[in-house]
Amino acid sequence: MTTILFAAKRADWAAYEAPLRQSMADLGVSADLVLEADPAEVDYLIYSPASTVQDFRPYTRLKAVLSLWAGVESIVGNTTLQVPLCRMVDPGLTEGMVEWVTGHVLRHHLGMDAHIQGQDGVWRNDVVPPLARDRRVAVLGLGALGSACAQMLAQLQFNTLGWSRRPKDISGVSCYSGEDGLRQVLSQAEIVVLLLPATPQTENTLNAESLALLPRGAVIINPGRGTLIDDEALLSALDTGQVGHATLDVFRAEPLPPEHAYWQHPCVTVTPHIASETRPVSAARTVMENIHRHLNGAALLNVVDRATGY
């Protein structure tokens, strides 16, 4: 009998058990779904990096680890993990990210903060935003989440630019790649959305040099990873007005410490890593469909490339 071990946070079991069992029934997956098991008898791990399982060597029968998180940077370097690692690519997670990114892009594009600040009786109608087609918005990172967000922004008629390390072709999006491409994108972008993975190559993508390329007053929106930004460089750019505002959902340390300068800065909006939560119902279906594929001889989906880290 196939054994599937739920090796995420114990507190998440209550939310995931019923959706996982329902997906098993719907797909006809015959297996034992358990919260505890002899490691030597486990075939699949449904996993989050917050799990107590950090040494995979006892799992001698293990065929794959299926992460409930989109980010895998905290596990991909684990040398005891020798089987395929599948990251979470879930329609619900993607939809949530598209909604969050679109909402905040529109917020900054329309100048909502200035229009509603204080509700103090002041009639502020001196600044009228351009139409979306005249606003240049860049999405850095064109994986599943970045591509979906860029496509939505393009559908709203934004002049949408996209950048990735490797060439991409997305309808309605002007796609760039490579270091020269990044400089070209940043030099045009009035709003920048960061959706790159956390790897050694992407750390501090926005630093003093790259922030200086932006049109003065550009807006940064980061629902990707905290390591993508050099915090001191961003704070300096905010102080000088080179960057007009930063809306940040992810940070190097989470929860963001109360004494961090981002909390007090008037040109920073902090949100508590809520851009797109994994929804148990859709995530359970995604994980179980992947296990079902593998049990029936098909290749696993969304397997992490250890060389690139995503």
Image (cartoon, rainbow, N blue to C red):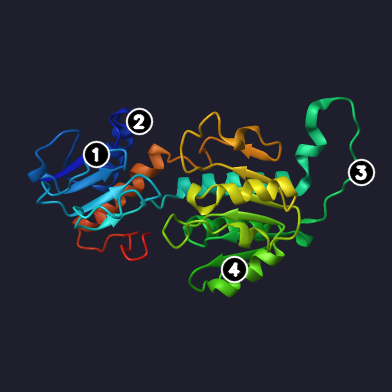
Looking at the rendered structure, the kind of residue marked 4 is Leu
Residue 158 seen: no
Which residue is located at x 60 percent, y 59 percent? 139
Q: Are marks 3 and 4 in contact (CB under 8 Å)?
A: no
Residue 93 is left or right of residue 216, and the answer is left
Residue 259 occupies quadrant? top right
Q: Which mark, residue 253?
A: none
**Distance of label 1 from label 2 (alpha carbons):** 14 Å
Q: Which mark is residue 7?
A: 1
Looking at the image, tell me whether mark 2 or mark 3 is earlier in sequence order. 2
Badge nearest the viewer, 2 or 3:
3
Judged by depth in the image, the label closer to the viewer, 3 or 4, is 4
From the viewer's side, name the closer residue of 289 and 204.
204
Q: CA distance from mark 3 to mark 4?
A: 34 Å
Q: Nearer the viewer, residue 72 or 98?
A: 72
Say what amino acid the circle numbered 2 marks: Ala
Q: Amino acid at mark 1?
A: Ala
Q: What is the spatial separation of the Cα atoms under label 3 and label 1, in whole angstroms?
A: 55 Å
Q: Residue at x 40, y 43 (%)?
A: 282
- State the SS at label 3: loop
User: Label 4 vs label 2: CA separation?
Assistant: 41 Å
| Label 1 vs label 2, nearer the camera | 1
Dot 4 lies on which element?
helix
Q: Position of residue 55 (x, y in %)?
A: 18, 45
Which residue is label 2 attached to?
A: 15
Q: Which mark is residue 182?
A: 4
Q: Which badge, 4 or 2, is on the more N-terminal residue?
A: 2
Question: Disc 1 and disc 4: Cα gap in Å?
Answer: 39 Å
